[in-house]
Structure formats: C-alpha cells, structure tokens
C-alpha cells in the first residue's frame, strides 16, 4: 500500500501501515512514539476536514513531485513577476494563460500603411488605391472638421461664460443704499524733507501710495499741464459747459437749458444715433419744473408728473412714427398715390395702401373707407398722434360705431384721463362680446389704446417693433378711480422693461440705442445713463445727458457720494435706481484733468451742491485732489508777490462765491500735504491761504533738519535757502502779528545757515561772527547765564540744532588751538597767551553751557566738548 499525501501531510492509514525502522528504539518507547504520532496525525486531519473554504485534494507522492518539478521549471523560465501576476489575476478568477493565448491569435492589419506603387497598366490596383485614398482623405477631413468644431464650440462657450460673468459683475454694482463702498481715507505716516512727489488720494478708488526717493531727486517737478487729451466731441461738449457755467457766474436767469446746448453738439457732428438720443432727452425733459428742495425720484412718483412723462414718451414715439410713414411714402410715390393733399389722413391712407396688400387684408372687418380698411386707418392715425384724423375715419365709416366715437371724442378732450365710468363700461362690454375674439388685430389694438380694455394683450400682430409695443403699453396706463378692471401702472411697465426683459432681451450691446430709448421713454433715466457709460463710444454722451438731467432736477442721486455708480435705495419704490453723478463725473474727468485743468474744474463745478461724507463741499474736495495730483499750485491758485503780499489770479478764482473760497481750498490742500509729509509744498499753500504763522512753523521744521549741511550740498537745503529770502520779504510786508518765539526761531535758524556755510568753507572768523549775531550759544563767560535761560525758553527747532552747533564750534576752537601750536614760537608772546587763555575759557564755557541746558544731547557731543577742553591745555 503506497502512502498518500493529504495537503502536504501523511494520512493516518499510511502512518499505521508504515514499517519504520525501530532497531535503535526500545519496544516500550517505540510504541509510545507511534501513539503520539498517530494522535498528531488525527488532530491535523480533523482540522483540515473542518476547513470548508479549501477544497479536498488527494495526490500521491509521485504526483506531488511531478507538480513541484513543473512549478519549478515555470519559475526558472518566466521569473517571479509572472508568478505574482498569476497569483493576482487568479485570486479574481481570471485565467491569465488563456487570455495570453487569445491575444497571440490576434493579427495586426496594415490599415494606414503607405500604398505600394503600381504600374500604369494595373487598373485593378489603381482603382483599389483610389478607393483607399478617398477613404483616407475623408477620414482626415472629418478629423480636421471635428477638431475645428470642437475648438469653435470651446471658444464660444468661454465667451458666453465671460459675458455672463461680466453681466454679473455689473449687476453686482446694484445694491441697497445702506451698502455703501467704504472709501475712507487711510492716514499716512508723516515724512519730512525727503518725501517724494506723491499722488493725491483718488476719490474713486482711494489708492494711496507713498513713494520714497533719495533727497537729491526730490525737486519741485509737478505734473505740468500739457497737451489736451480731449477729442473733438469731448472738446465741443466742454466748450458748452464753459459757456453755461459763465452764465451761472454772471447770474443770468434766462439762460438756455443745458440739454439744448448739448443737443446742438450732436447736430454739429452729424452723429445720427447721438442726435436721436438727445431728441429723446429733450422730449422727456420738457415737463413742468420740479421744486429744487424735493427729491427728484419722489417728485417723479407724483401721478401728475408721471402722466406728463407718459405723454412725452407717447409724443416722441408718435412723432417718430409719423416721420417714418412720411419716409416710406416718399420712397414709393407711385405706389402710394398720395397726391398733393397735406394732413395726416392722406399720409395714413397712402401708408396703409403700401403696408397692407394681399394677405395683409385678410381678417379685417367693418368695411373700408376710401379703398382702405377702416381699423388699420384708425390705428395708424392714432399711432401718428392725430386722434382727430382717427375720428374722421370713424365718422366717415357710418353710424355703426357711435359708442366708440363718443369714447374717442372724450379722449381727444383729455388724452391722459380715463374715460367716464358709463362709457368705459360700455366699451369694455363691447370689447368682451365682439372685439376680443375678432379677427381684426387693428380693431383690438385701437380698443385697448383708447379704452384700456385688456392690459394683458401683447398685440403681436400689430406691435412688430419695440416702439409699437412701448406705445401701446403707454396708452394703457391711466389712473382709475375704481378697481373693477385690471390696471397697469407706470411702475409695472418700468419693472417689466428693466428687470423682466433687461439687457439680454433687447440685445443691448448690439442695439444700444433701442435699449436706451425704452428706458428713457419710461422715465428710467438713471439705468439708461449707466448703460451708456459702459459703452466707450457713448460714454461721453451719457455723462453730459446726466449733467443735463441734473440741471433740470430730473436725475435721482444717492444720499452718499461714495455709493456705487447705480444703486437701489430701500426707501424708493421698485424698480427705481439712483445714479451717482459724482462717481460718473470723476470717472469721465480723470483722463484729462491733468492736461485740461480749466475744463476739469468746470465739470467739478456741477458738484458744488453735493457734500462728501465729512460734510465738505464736493467741488472744493475735487479741487483739492486735483491740486495734490498736479502740484501745479501757481496755475490753480496764482502766486504770492513777496514785495506786496498780493496774490495773482488762478484758475480757481473764477468759481468764488459765498459757498466756495479759494483760500479754503488752499488750506485743505496744505493740510493734506502736511499729512503726506510734503512740507515744502505745504509752506507755499499755507502762504496762499493766508496762514503765514503755520507756513513759518513748517519752514522752521525743515530748516532745523538741513541747517547743519554745507551751502548747496543738498538740493533741499538749496531750495530752502532760496525760499527763505521769499519768506523774509513776506514777513517785512505782512502786517499780521506773529508769535515772538516763532519769529526769533526763524531768524536764528537763518543766521545758523550762514554760520554753517562759513564753517564748511572753513571761514572760521566769519563763522564765529555769525554765531555771535545769532545769540544762541555763549562765546564768553558773561553771556553764559543769558544763553542758558534763552535755551530753556527756545523752541524745539532751535534745540535740535544745538548739538550740531556745539560740535562745529568745538571743531573751530580746536582748529584755532592747533593753529597757534604750529605758528607759535618757542616763547609765546603776550597776545598769543591771551588768545590761548580765551580758547581755554571758551571751552570751559561751552562745557558748562552744555551741562546746564535742559536738553539732552547725543553722547558724542559731550565727548567732543570734553576732548576739546583737554586739548586746550
């Protein structure tokens, strides 16, 4: 019986039948060993049979040896990687060997290999090649077209996304009036003397940058006004602004309205689209004047004012359509057959004959007049603004429309008022019974225009353009005493155009004129101007339209000049917006304010009635920013004559009135310059503002910083030396009393400049003479007590100069002592001994003075004084 192997272990039967050699084992021990081995085998068998996850495999020892040799040969041939791959795929039930065999059976075809050349006589191969060439070219063309289509769609999608993002960004600027932009000014660290030319804070973005440059680069190099940045149209508008403001300066009451002046500019340049926009503004501005102390948006919410706006909007649309009909008839005189008869009725008859031909006459009811259908004639007479001609048509048609004739007669008497209750009821009843389901769209449109019967009817068969649709909607807006019928208000129309339809519906960027007209004709001036300001071509027109509307108190502005360009005030009824005129104007003026200051100031003058968040006059704030930006103070404020103290005329003087003062503007500029550390400019502006005391204080501060430098060594010191001459002449001619301590400090600082000039030139005798005149430090024992008392009462500007003065004086005394040592003979004469004794006394006096004054100086100053005293012996 052969032994069997079960999962790598001998079975129990093989153990029992096996004949093991026990020659070396004792009998008792032999049986004990076999018994233990049997127990272990049975235990292993039990454990194996209890494992249900592994299958039971029985192999003989020969089979196990054969499988081991086969596995070993595979390992030696394929390596360990294949074994690991088999284990990985085998654990998932995949036979890797079978898959490899299937892959080997696959054969690659020469699909896109180059075609072999063929002989000219081989027709079959030629046709085969041509066929394959056609297939390949088709595949290549389809591939190219697919790539190009994908590229085009990608860019189209990106542009569409970007346009949506732009619209979101612009719409994000519309917010409640409480969410103002925080544009508060940030205080700057004060720098003295070496502050470079710094741009003023912009009221638009309040971007502040303080740029530091070396002192020798800091010169008075303001941004001089240069070549004009205005184009022809902008310059023409600016001329009108200047003329208008001059009439305001002169107090002319019967001056021409600003919108008429600006409209003339569009006429002169023959810009048809701009001309049409100004015609709309002229028409909508021609309403009763508002009270100047009333908010324009609240005034426009008055029912009487709304009716005026509606009437003006209808009038513009009617005049424009009448002109359109005249143009159509004029271009087709033969087909129109108008004749020479004037008036609206012949014009409409000719137009209807051209407009309605063939299928256009189908569905029309109630007969004809003068070979033309009745209701189209009535509609186009009303559409052209001639209700009397429409009444003539109805009367000519017979007595079948008496009720509507009465309604039309009442409409002619007062177009803005609703019909009487009895007549309105009759018209509504007739519309519901007969007209609503009639096949004549012109009859329905006429009933709705006169009787306001159905405000929900869009009249798409008749209203084919935005103008037609808007005219019909304006006709249906009338105040109703009772609420029996559905009403349509002015606010409903405004909300529909601005919020429901918006720029997308009207393709605003493709047709800006259309969108501007529908907004303006519905009294929404603020969104219309804000839309124009986003289009570079029409920005200049939009800005001046805002000025024209602001001039007649039609433009709604926010309560805070830091609001977004277009904002929503929670107190205003929907969908009214407020336009930030100040922000719009500053955005426009920003590009030419440095090259055309006169024009910029005249534009700023429109902001004279507005206040900034601090309550300051906005015009004066803008002038302050312009002065800080340009630094050309002489052009803006004029120049002070040192001899007489009189100021020459500057650009700002023409705007002076009880609320605007050039000196106040100069004072604001000076304060801003001080905050920026630009003390040189601030001195000039304080002088112009008439505050000579403050100018002298700043001058002393600057002098104390550069007084110890050599003459002409630094650009700042050289400029201050020249300016000191101007200040000295001003002090002599100005009778304004100034503090004695300030004048004393100024005079002593000027003398110290002379002292240091001589010191650096090594003119020590002249330097000592200048210092004696200055009376700042003692030059003898008798002066010590007075100089100590004077130092204790001196201003800080003088005390800051003391260390440099004492060190310079110590250097002078030491140099004189060394000179005496070199020039003296072995036996000193009596005058020389006296001079040496004076130098010793002077050294002692200076050390005593330095120790008694209540001002702590740097340690090197005390060291140099002590060293000087030692060298004197």
Image (cartoon, rainbow, N blue to C red):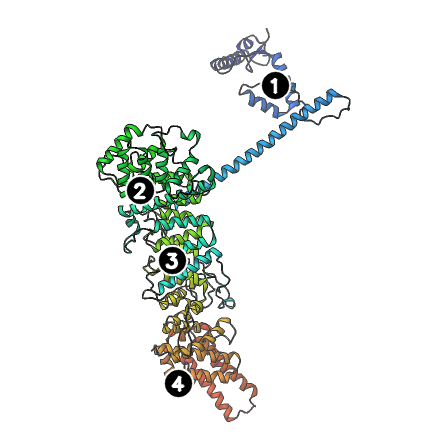
CA–CA distance between discs 2 and 4? 89 Å
CA–CA distance between discs 3 and 4? 52 Å
**Mark found first going from the N terminus, 1 or 2:** 1
**Does the residue at mark 3 contact the one at mark 1 (Cβ under 8 Å)?**
no
Q: Secondary structure at mark 2?
A: helix
Q: Secondary structure at mark 4?
A: helix
**Mark found first going from the N terminus, 2 or 4:** 2
Quadrant assignment for the N terminus: top right
| Residue 198, position as x, y percentages in the image | 46, 62
| Residue 355, position as x, y percentages in the image | 43, 35
CA–CA distance between discs 1 and 4? 118 Å
**Mark found first going from the N terminus, 3 or 1:** 1
- Badge 1 is on which residue? 97
Q: How many marks?
A: 4
CA–CA distance between discs 3 and 1? 80 Å
Determine crowd level at label 3: few under 14, some 14-19, many 20+ residues with C-alpha closer than 10 A.
few
The quadrant where residue 186 appears: bottom left
1 or 2: mark nearer the eye: 2
For residue 491, which numbered disc appears in the image? Answer: 2
| Residue 231, position as x, y percentages in the image | 49, 56
| Residue 348, position as x, y percentages in the image | 39, 39
**Mark found first going from the N terminus, 2 or 3:** 3
């Amino acid at each position: 019986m052969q032994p069997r192997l079960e999962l790598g272990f001998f079975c129990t039967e093989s153990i029992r039948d096996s004949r093991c050699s026990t020659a070396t084992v004792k009998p008792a021990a032999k049986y004990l060993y076999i018994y233990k081995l049997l127990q272990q085998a049975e235990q292993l068998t039990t454990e194996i049979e209890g494992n249900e996850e592994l299958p039971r495999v029985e192999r003989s020892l020969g089979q196990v040896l054969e499988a081991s040799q086969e596995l070993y040969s595979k390992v030696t041939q394929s390596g360990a990687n294949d074994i690991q791959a088999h284990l990985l795929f085998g654990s998932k039930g995949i036979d890797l060997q079978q898959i490899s065999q299937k892959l080997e059976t696959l054969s690659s075809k020469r699909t896109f290999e180059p075609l072999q050349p063929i002989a000219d006589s081989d027709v079959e191969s030629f046709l085969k090649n041509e066929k394959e060439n056609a297939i390949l070219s088709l595949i290549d063309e389809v591939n190219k077209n697919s790539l190009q289509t994908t590229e085009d769609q990608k860019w189209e999608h990106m542009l569409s996304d970007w346009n949506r993002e732009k619209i979101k960004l612009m719409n994000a600027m519309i917010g409640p009036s409480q969410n103002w932009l925080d544009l508060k000014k940030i205080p700057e660290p004060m720098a003295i003397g070496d502050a470079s030319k710094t741009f003023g804070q912009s009221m638009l973005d309040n971007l502040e940058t303080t740029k530091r440059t070396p002192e020798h680069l800091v010169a008075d190099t303001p941004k001089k006004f240069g070549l004009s940045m205005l184009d022809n149209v902008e310059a023409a508008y600016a001329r009108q602004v200047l003329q208008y403001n001059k009439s305001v300066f002169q107090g002319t009451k019967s001056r021409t309205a600003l919108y008429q002046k600006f409209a003339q500019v569009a006429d002169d340049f023959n810009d048809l689209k701009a001309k049409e926009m100004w015609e709309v503004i002229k028409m909508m501005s021609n309403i009763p004047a508002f009270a100047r102390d009333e908010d324009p948006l609240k005034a426009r919410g008055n029912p009487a004012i709304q009716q005026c706006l509606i009437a003006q909007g209808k009038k513009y649309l009617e005049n424009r359509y009448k002109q359109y009909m005249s143009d159509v008839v004029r271009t087709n005189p033969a087909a129109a057959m108008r004749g020479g008869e004037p008036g609206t009725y012949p014009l409409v008859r000719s137009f209807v004959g051209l407009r309605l031909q063939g299928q256009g006459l189908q569905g029309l009811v109630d007969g004809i007049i003068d070979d033309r259908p009745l209701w189209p004639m009535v509609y186009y007479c009303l559409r052209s603004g001639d209700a009397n001609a429409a009444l003539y048509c109805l009367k000519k048609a017979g007595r079948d429309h008496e009720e509507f004739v009465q309604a039309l007669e009442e409409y002619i008497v007062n177009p803005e008022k609703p019909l009487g209750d009895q007549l309105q009821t009759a018209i509504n009843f007739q519309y519901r019974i007969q007209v609503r389901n009639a096949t004549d769209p012109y009859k329905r449109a006429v009933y709705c225009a006169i009787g306001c019967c159905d405000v929900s009817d869009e009249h798409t068969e008749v209203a084919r353009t935005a103008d037609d649709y808007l005219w019909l909607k304006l006709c249906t807006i009338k105040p109703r005493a009772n609420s029996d019928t559905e009403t349509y208000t002015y606010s409903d129309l405004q909300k529909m155009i601005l919020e429901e339809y918006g720029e997308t519906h009207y393709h605003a960027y493709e047709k800006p004129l259309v969108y501007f007209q529908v907004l303006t004709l519905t009294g929404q001036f603020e969104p219309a101007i804000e839309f124009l300001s986003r289009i570079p071509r029409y920005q200049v027109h939009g800005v001046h339209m805002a000025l024209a509307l602001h001039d007649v108190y039609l433009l709604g502005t926010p309560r805070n000049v830091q609001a977004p360009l277009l904002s929503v005030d929670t107190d205003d009824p929907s969908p009214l917006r407020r336009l930030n005129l100040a922000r719009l104007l500053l955005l426009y003026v920003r590009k030419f304010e440095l090259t055309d200051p006169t024009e910029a100031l005249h534009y700023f003058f429109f902001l004279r009635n507005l206040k900034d968040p601090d309550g300051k006059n906005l015009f004066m704030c803008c002038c302050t920013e312009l002065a800080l930006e340009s630094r050309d103070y002489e052009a803006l404020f004029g120049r002070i004559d040192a001899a007489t103290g009189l100021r020459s005329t500057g650009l700002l003087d023409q705007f002076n009135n009880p609320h605007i003062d050039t000196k106040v503007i100069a004072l604001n500029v000076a304060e801003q310059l001080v905050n920026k550390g630009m003390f040189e400019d601030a001195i000039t502006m304080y002088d112009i503002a008439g505050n000579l005391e403050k100018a002298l204080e700043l001058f002393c501060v600057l002098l104390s910083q550069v007084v110890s430098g050599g003459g002409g060594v630094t650009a700042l010191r050289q400029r201050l030396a020249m300016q000191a001459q101007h200040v000295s002449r001003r002090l002599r001619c100005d009778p304004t009393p100034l503090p004695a301590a300030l004048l004393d400090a100024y005079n002593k600082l000027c003398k110290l400049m002379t002292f240091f000039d001589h010191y650096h030139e090594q003119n020590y005798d002249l330097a000592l003479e200048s210092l004696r005149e200055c009376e700042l430090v003692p030059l003898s024992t008798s002066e010590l007590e007075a100089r100590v008392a004077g130092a204790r009462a001196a201003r800080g500007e003088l005390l800051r100069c003391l260390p440099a003065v004492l060190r310079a004086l110590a250097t002078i005394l030491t140099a004189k002592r060394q000179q005496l040592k070199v020039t003296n003979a072995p036996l000193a004469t009596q005058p020389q001994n006296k001079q040496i004794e004076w130098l010793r006394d002077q050294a002692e006096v200076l050390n005593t003075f330095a120790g008694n004054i209540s001002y702590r100086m740097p340690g090197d100053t005390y060291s140099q004084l002590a060293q000087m005293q030692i060298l004197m012996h």
